[in-house]
Amino acid sequence: NAGVTQTPKFRVLKTGQSMTLLCAQDMNHEYMYWYRQDPGMGLRLIHYSVGEGTTAKGEVPDGYNVSRLKKQNFLLGLESAAPSQTSVYFCASSFRPSGNYEQYFGPGTRLTVT
Amino acid sequence: AQSVTQLGSHVSVSEGALVLLRCNYSSSVPPYLFWYVQYPNQGLQLLLKYTSAATLVKGINGFEAEFKKSETSFHLTKPSAHMSDAAEYFCAVTAGSGGYQKVTFGIGTKLQVIP
C-alpha cells in the first residue's frame, strides 16, 4: 500500500497563477481532508470530503476550491495564488470522520507564491 | 468547542534523558486524544491515541501518554531519548463519534535531542 500520496512535492508560483494539488489514497477511506501548515499555527483545515462527490469548508477555505470526483482522489485548487498561500499543504484520509479513527497523512506539498 | 494547548514550542533534551511533552485540552464532551509525530520533510504519523479504554496509552517507539481528566492533560513521555526522536510532535483532540467531528491540532512541539 502506498497510503496517501501527494503531487507535486514542491511548487513555486507567481501571484495570480493557478494550480491544482492532487491527493490520492489507496486505503478505500471515505473521508479526506486538506490542511495547511504554517509555523506557529499547527494544522488548519481548508476543506474536507465525507464521500465521493461531496465536499465541505473547513476553517480557512477562502482562496481554495476542491473536488472529489473519485473516492480515491481529492484535488485542491488555487485559482489565483497569493503570497499568503505560501505554506506546506497536507492531505489526509480516515476510515471514519470522528471518534478514535486517526487520520493518515501524505508527505506534503511545499508551495511558495512570489 | 474544543482546544489544545501545547506548552513549549521547542524542547531540548540530552540523549538518554526523559522526554516530557505537555498537552492540555479543553472539551465540553469526553474527548478522543491523539499524539502525532512529524519527521523532517514528512507528513504526520500517529504515535498513540486515547480512546477511553485505558488512561495510560502506549504507542510506537517507546512513547506513552497518560490521560488525566482532573488535570485535562495528555502529556507524552519517553523514559530515554534517542537521537532518532528528534521531530515535531502534535497533540490533537476531537470529540464525539457521530458524523464529522472537527479535529483540533496543537501548534506543535519541536524536540531536539542533544548527543
Image (cartoon, rainbow, N blue to C red):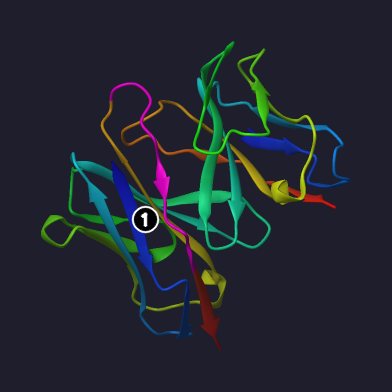
- Please report the bounds of the magenta region as a residue range: B98-109
Mark 1: secondary structure: loop
Could you classify mark 1 by the number of other residues whose Cα lies within 10 Å: few (under 14), some (14-19), or many (20 or more)?
Answer: some
Residue A48 horizontal/vertical position (percent): 53, 27
Which residue corresponds to the image point at 67% horizontal and 12% vertical from the top-left? Answer: A69
Residue B21 located left or right of residue B38: left
Q: Which amino acid does label 1 sit on?
A: Gly
Which residue corresponds to the image point at 19% horizontal and 43% vertical from the top-left? Answer: B52
Which residue corresponds to the image point at 50% horizontal and 57% vertical from the top-left? Answer: B37
Q: Which of these two is toward me, A46 or A89?
A: A46
Residue B71 horizontal/vertical position (percent): 15, 62
Given the image, what chain letter belongs to the residue carrying mark 1? Answer: B
What residue does disc 1 label? B59
- Magenta includes B53? no
The picture quadrant where one finds residue B90 is: bottom left
- Magenta includes B101? yes
Q: Which of these two is toward me, B26 or B80?
A: B26
Residue B16 located left or right of residue A12: left
Q: Which of these two is toward me, B58 or B103?
A: B103
Quadrant containing the C terminus of chain B is: bottom right
Above or below for A74 versus A90: above
Above or below for A82 versus A19: below
The picture quadrant where one finds residue A60 is: top right
